[in-house]
Image (tube, helix red, strand yellow):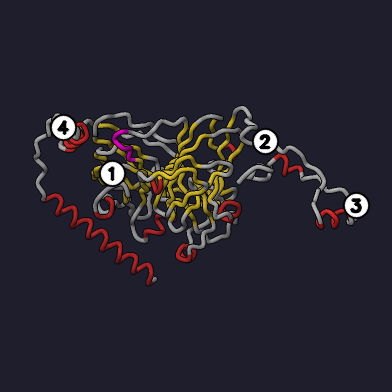
């Protein structure tokens, strides 16, 4: 109870500060600068368009309805050379859905699923959010955009009771990949029930083209019952405080991007994954078994690391990951904090179709009796003489092994 009271006091102060910040901002006069004319200096092509774009009043920007998508789909590239007023509609919905086979959970969602829909805008855009809280909700909700600049990320402006709608605007000042999440007290409970998603702010010059793009967000869930215990499982605050997760999953559900829901690509294609970590607690060690990341936009920013095996994604953070698929097969997506993958649900699949390329990797070339050297060979020859057992069928087929039998990292 003391922890909950403290959390409520902190959040109240957080919201009050945000409200004061908004009042002060409202008192400031709008900028009245004259657009900068182009000059013959070498720096003019870079400076003048950005300054002129910044000077366009919001009510003179072209208005665009945002194209948003449910995971694992990604909205189309922006393909604009100017800023716009981008309108986004969000609704918070509390609904019971499948967590795993035989296990249900009452998620708190943005737009009806976990994660919330992916939003894609351009650096310099103004984003207008129409934020509704479904009348059937049991509590108020709001949204904190990590992509925005200002107290609370919009948490105070979007604090909305059930059956109400709030509207506010924020400007996408900096390119990157950012989490958004609910920030109503107790904040951890709202996030822990699935209230998070991603915003991509494309740089003005755009991103390099790739063949396939996917939207993935990891989250950890805390239930009264153990992993796999059937029935409707309520949220467990004590486990959440101890960071003792029962489920660690991609896109809100066990198997959300595996089996019939697996991601698909073809040999030779380039893949970009927009990967977030909603948390609320655990850091992700994101890895694709059998692939090396050609590029990782570290923490969703401008810093690029190359030839990466696994990348850390903090709770409340994100990363953009790019690689080319060279051979066919099923590539397992995991949190390489490995018991989370094999015992708590953090497993997905990228299924790649196309021709084999044995120069990259072969199938198993042989399977013979043990051949040792030196003392090991003498010990083996003095044994009972029984032939070595054949490899289990599942090892060759990979049917029960996410590493694909003999393949994997």
Q: Which mark is residue 292?
A: none
Q: Which of disc 1 and disc 2 is earlier in sequence?
A: 1
What residue is pinned by disc 2?
362
Residue 98 seen in the current view: no
Classify mark 3: helix, strand or loop.
loop
Above or below, 1 against 386 in this view is below
Counting every numbered tag in the picture gives 4
Name the image quarter holding residue 37. Answer: top left
- Residue at the location (24% across, 43% down)? 171
Which region of the structure is painted magenta? 201-205
Would residue 400 be found to the left or right of residue 295 on screen?
right
Name the image quarter holding residue 56. Answer: top left
Given residues 349 and 261, the one toward you in this image is 349
- Residue at the location (48% across, 45% down)? 251
| Residue 1: % across, % down | 39, 71
Q: Which of disc 4 and disc 3 is earlier in sequence?
A: 4
What residue is pinned by disc 3?
385
The residues bearing labels 1 and 3 have C-alpha atoms spaced at a distance of 69 Å
Mark 1 near mark 4, Cβ–Cβ under 8 Å? no
Prevailing secondary structure class for the magenta stretch in the rendered image: loop
Classify mark 4: helix, strand or loop.
loop
Q: Which mark is residue 174?
A: 1
Is residue 113 in the magenta section? no
């Amino acid at each position: 109870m003391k922890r909950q009271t403290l959390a409520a006091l902190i959040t109240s102060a957080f919201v009050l500060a945000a409200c004061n910040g908004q009042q002060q901002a409202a008192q400031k006069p709008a900028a009245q600068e004259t657009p900068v004319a182009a000059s013959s200096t070498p720096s003019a092509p870079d400076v003048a368009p950005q300054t002129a774009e910044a000077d366009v009043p919001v009510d003179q920007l072209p208005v665009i309805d945002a194209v948003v998508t449910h995971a694992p789909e990604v909205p189309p590239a922006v393909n604009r050379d100017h800023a716009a007023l981008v309108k986004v509609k969000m609704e918070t919905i509390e609904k019971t859905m499948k967590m795993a086979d035989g296990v249900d959970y009452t998620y708190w969602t943005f737009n009806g699923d976990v994660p919330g829909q992916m939003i894609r805008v351009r650096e310099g855009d103004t984003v207008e959010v129409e934020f509704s809280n479904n009348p059937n909700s049991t509590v108020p909700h709001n949204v904190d955009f990590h992509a925005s600049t200002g107290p609370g990320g919009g948490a105070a402006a979007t604090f909305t009771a059930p059956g109400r709608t709030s509207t506010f605007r924020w400007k996408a000042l900096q390119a990157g990949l950012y989490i958004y999440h609910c920030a109503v007290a107790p904040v951890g409970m709202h996030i822990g029930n699935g209230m998070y998603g991603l915003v991509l702010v494309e740089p003005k010059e755009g991103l390099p083209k790739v063949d396939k793009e996917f939207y993935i967000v990891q989250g950890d869930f805390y239930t009264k019952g153990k992993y796999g215990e059937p029935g409707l499982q309520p949220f467990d605050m004590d486990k959440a405080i101890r960071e003792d997760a029962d489920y660690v999953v991609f896109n809100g559900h066990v198997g959300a991007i595996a089996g019939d829901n697996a991601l698909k690509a073809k040999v030779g294609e380039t893949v970009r994954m927009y990967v977030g970590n909603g948390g609320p607690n655990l850091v992700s060690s994101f890895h694709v078994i059998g692939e090396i990341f050609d590029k990782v936009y570290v923490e969703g920013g401008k810093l690029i690391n190359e030839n990466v095996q696994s990348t850390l994604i903090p709770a409340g953070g994100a990363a953009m990951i790019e690689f080319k698929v060279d051979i066919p097969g099923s590539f397992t997506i995991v949190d390489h904090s490995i018991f989370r993958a094999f015992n708590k649900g953090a497993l997905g699949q990228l299924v790649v179709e196309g021709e084999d390329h044995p120069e990259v990797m072969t199938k198993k070339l042989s399977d013979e009796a043990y051949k040792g050297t030196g003392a090991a060979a003498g010990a083996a020859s003095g044994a009972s003489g029984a032939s070595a057992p054949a490899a289990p069928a599942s090892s060759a087929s990979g049917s029960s092994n996410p590493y694909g039998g003999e393949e994997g990292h």
